[in-house]
Amino acid sequence: MAPLSEGGTDALLPDLPKGPLQAYRARASFCWRELVLFLEGEDVLRLKKAIFSALENDPLFARSHGEDLSLEKYRELSFLRCKRVMEYSLLPVEEMVARPLSVQTLIACLGMYDWSLAVKFLLHMLTFGSAIYSSGSERHLKYLPKIFNMDIFGCFAVTELSHGSNAKAIRTTAHYDPATEEFIIHSPDFEAAKFWVGNMGKTATHAVVFAQLYTPGGQCHGLHSFVVQIRNTKTLLPMPGVMVGDIGKKLGLNGVDNGFAMFHKVRIPRQDLLNRTGDVTPEGTYITPFKDDRQRFGASLGTLSFGRVAIVGMSIVNLKLALSIALRFSATRCQFGPSDGEEVPVLEYQTQQWRLLPYLAAAYALDHFSKSLFLDLAELQQGLMGTDQGARQAELGREIHALASAGKPLASWTAQRGIQECREACGGHGYLAVNRLGDLRNDNDPNCTYEGDNNILLQQTSSYLLSLLACHVQGGARFESPLRTVDFLQAYPDILGQRFTCPSVDSCLDSSVPLAAYEWLVCYLLRESYQKLNQEKRSGSNDFEARNNSQVYYCHPLALAFLELTVVRRFHEYTHQPHVPPPLRAVLGRLSALYALWSLSQHTALLYQGGYFSGEQAGKMIQNAILDLCSQLKDDAVALVDVIAPPDFVLDSPIGRADGELYKNLWTAVLLESRVLERPSWWSEFSVHKPRIGSLKSKL
């Protein structure tokens, strides 16, 4: 990381406002600026500052506290704000290509302000635009300037009314007609309607539509993607043969217009097939650079993985925001204390530390994983854009698919639980809408569902691991993968023979201890799942029944444990690398150990069940290590929040403001919300017509 230029520190990382939080900031064991620079780098900080400044200084992004926007108004604002972000050109295309993480930074910053804006932008610019760029070829480049200029507005249409997670069962068809060199896009019935598609409800003019590709003679070549115009770009009226509309109000993210579409024999040019992994000649012959369907599907998984990888990052942003609010509140909210002394901040209580600080460690660990997985996906997409169509590229696609399929559940569930814990940790004040925790909870909730139901996605990851074990058992294949996430399994028999041997709590305070335990846990669950599947098959179950009966206590925890191991390993290696500045090593090491031990503690029963733990001391040692690490991180908590929190305008929470003036900020916000001295608008009508007790008695 290059050092900041002279005077750059103050410009990019200005002093935080003085106030009640100063006491905790003074006790921090590290300099928050140094940690920000180590984690982000100057280029990312400059991009963040440019984004946040653009939003704060533009009246279109002014906050409207106390005003409940109608559904139509919220969607109008989201579209106009999306258009304005595009006009700012905050991230040129060449920057996106040269620095892939800048894309994730832009989405995170917009999401910190409002997820409806971020999702609308992401779906158009990145999901729709990236699908055309990475899945298409030179003939599709004509769409890119139109996307950047918003001459067209896009959406990504995979999910159907009757099929979501099971993408292979999508029923929309694309039959090729060689007489006209066109594909005929068709929805066989209403169950095949594209559904839940973001941007499709009101604003999208074009869609990347996934359909089963048929060539003359009736042969189906599986799922492929096509660019289909669904609305007139001038009038926004549906194109001939297209029925398109909005699905209505949701629990959250209501600035995004989710919609549906049905296609009645809609003809599109042959060239609008996105042909990176498969194409059709003018005569109707199907061609592909891949040797078999498995390789082609593995390479195409990158497109489907993009949304899941993005959701990992989105979930972690939500967790960061909630923690910023809850920990600043906890450091300034004073309750109880010694009988002869002053009240103390609730952060001083062990229970509050135990409730919040493991989630803070999770936010740091999962954030690093999210960034590294995003870079892995960028490598896959760059390979697709080049000439790399070999076996390694297909294996990379399968591995990233497995990581994304478990990464989304782990990140979204961790954020879901963490945001709720933050809400409750702020007591009644956390329930006030103005403090934003409710909106964060509602806007995060769909992360657990879209781009694949979490429980279904975990089956993708466990199936990947089980297929590797099957190849090893049946043919002696090595355990290895392009990103080396499964290479440790080569020592599978030896790892299963290991046991927990830590002599003291102090010896547990490094993430290498839970890392070794996680390797054993994954090997144990992999063996148990494999044996359970074979037992089911020997009992007469077919493959489907065997998999179905092996999920709950076998394959499901296997997938989660494997992903947790991957997160723990990557964060452990990152925090223990030689380039970590000496003043940051202790706090980063504690975060790494706390996340690893806290996650591992949720598998205590399995560790005892399989024999890795024995005796009561093993479990107690892990518990005491977690509490010790929470205590050690307590004085660093506010500074760690300062590293991840956005400016006050973006965080938009009175109890989470950087000055820590908890009650002053809350009182001001409540006065603005309540419109003091105003009586209810309905009171006059009620007072004239309210029932009289006497008249009621006479009627009785």
Image: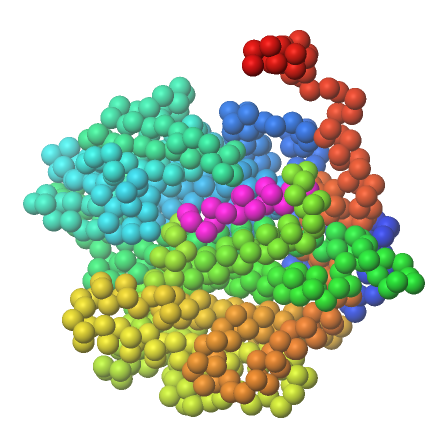
| Colour pattern | rainbow
Q: Quadrant of the N terminus?
A: bottom right
Q: Quadrant of the C terminus?
A: top right
* Count of marks placed on residues: 0
In terms of image quadrants, where is residue 66?
Answer: top right
- Residue 26 in the magenta stretch? The answer is no
Q: Position of residue 161 (x, y in %)?
A: 30, 39
Q: Residue at x 41, y 86 (%)?
A: 496
Residue 294 falls left or right of residue 401: left
The magenta stretch is 435-450
Residue 122's place in the image compared with 390, above or below, is above
Residue 664 falls left or right of residue 101: right
Q: Is residue 267 visible?
A: no
Q: Position of residue 422 (x, y in %)?
A: 64, 53
- Residue 444 in the magenta stretch? The answer is yes
Q: Position of residue 436 (x, y in %)?
A: 65, 42
Nearer to us in this view, 152 or 81: 81
Nearer to us in this view, 539 or 595: 539
Residue 655's place in the image compared with 177, above or below, is below
Magenta span main SS: helix
Q: Residue at x 62, y 90 (%)?
A: 503
Q: Residue at x 23, y 40 (%)?
A: 172
Nearer to us in this view, 552 or 693: 693
Instruction: Name the residue at the right extreme.
Output: 340
Instruction: Name the residue at the left extreme.
Output: 217
Q: Residue at x 71, y 34 (%)?
A: 57
Q: Position of residue 563 (x, y in %)?
A: 46, 68
Q: Is residue 447 visible?
A: yes
Residue 208 falls left or right of residue 654: left
